Amino acid sequence: MLEAKTLIYEKYKPELDKIMKVFNKKRQVSEDDIYYRFSVKYNLSAKEIEEIIDWIRAQNIKLVRIEGEDNFKPEEYEKIINQASISDPVKMYFKDMGKVPLLSADEEVDLAKKMIEGSEYAKARLCEANLRLVVSIAKRYTGKSGMQFLDLIQEGNIGLLKAVEKFDYTKGFRFSTYATWWIRQAITRAIADQARTIRIPVHMVETINKLSRVSKKLLQELGREPTTKEIAKELNITEDKVVEIQKIALDPISLENPVGEEEDSKIGDFIEDETSLNPAEAANRAMLKEQLLAVIDTLTPREQKVIRLRYGLDDAHPRTLEEVGREFNVTRERIRQIEAKALRKLKHPNRSKKLKDFCE
């Protein structure tokens, strides 16, 4: 027996080491996680996974059971469909769903066999009988995901369809056990993709969730909000990285959001535009431009155009000597000479004295 357990560890060492790491941090491991790691990744049977679970239990690791169909009580279902916030069409959908009888293990196997033979009815029946499982999982994400309950159910249904396509009855699992992971994966990925105005990659969402869990844990342990340094130490990352993750986690709000009881103001009305000029500076710039153009008007028409083009006075788009040369069909050297002559004229006291006050 000892040799068999040693073989299990050697065979699945990378995954088992990860499970040990999770346990050391959380002091418990989800059977859902074990199932995913060894059934979905390694395509193992129920019996093989049971041997792995026995090995894990032998290490005194606390296992948390999968929350499946059997944990969803009828009274919970009735409570959901009677919620005032749910529209009548959705209630009708829930009530119709509740009329579909659940399947026994033998019925699941029978339908799975018929699916292999190409029966669309068997596929539909397996889906319909497990729609309540989707609701039971989706309801756990309401209020904290940023998505509507019905949207979560829709995404969960997509995961259910994938589970039906991939279900292998020969592995010995109940379908609800197998489907749970696919439904959860579909919902969590949808939350990562759709719940935010600005999409955050799935791996970053997982990092944000991890930081959130650590922050709550430290809050309970310390009795106060943890510092950035304490969070960084717990996660084994730098303080700068913690700040970066916290910034990414912030939800954007609309500048059009109403403010106050009367809702006659918007958030945008109270945010300073740091790029705009104050009235005094704006007036000063307008007067400077007026005087500058008046001084430039004392040059010859050709010199005026060269200066305007070279410094972008008309369109804020300065041109190179070569670009201005093409305008006049002359060489860049000739343009340089015209520009130099025009600048000498502008520096003459009779012209420059009008602009000196603006330089102080």
Image: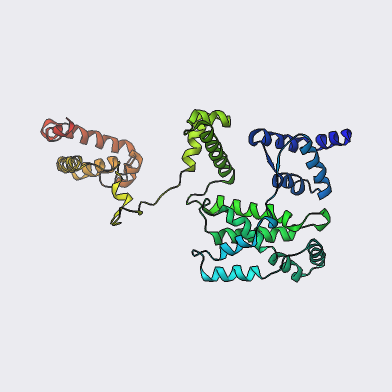
Task: Say which of 250 and 220 sits in front.
Answer: 220
- In this picture, residue 334 sits left or right of residue 91: left
Specify whether residue 45 is in view.
Answer: no
Q: Looking at the picture, does residue 283 appear above or below residue 228?
A: below
Residue 181: x and y in percent read 68, 52
Q: Residue at x 57, y 71 (%)?
A: 92
Q: Dividing the image into 4 quarters, which one contains the C terminus?
A: top left
Specify whether residue 114 is in view.
Answer: yes
Residue 150: x and y in percent read 55, 62
Task: Say which of 263 and 339 sits in front.
Answer: 263
Q: Residue at x 53, y 51 (%)?
A: 145
Task: Say which of 268 and 4 sits in front.
Answer: 4
Q: Dividing the image into 4 quarters, which one contains the N terminus?
A: top right
Q: Looking at the picture, does residue 232 appear above or below residue 31?
A: above
- In this picture, residue 113 sits left or right of residue 339: right
Q: Residue furthest left?
A: 350
Q: Looking at the picture, does residue 359 appear above or below residue 196?
A: above
Q: Residue 14 occupies which quadrant of the picture? A: top right
- In this picture, residue 358 sits left or right of residue 226: left
Q: Residue 177 occupies which quadrant of the picture? A: bottom right
Residue 340: x and y in percent read 24, 33
Residue 342: x and y in percent read 21, 36
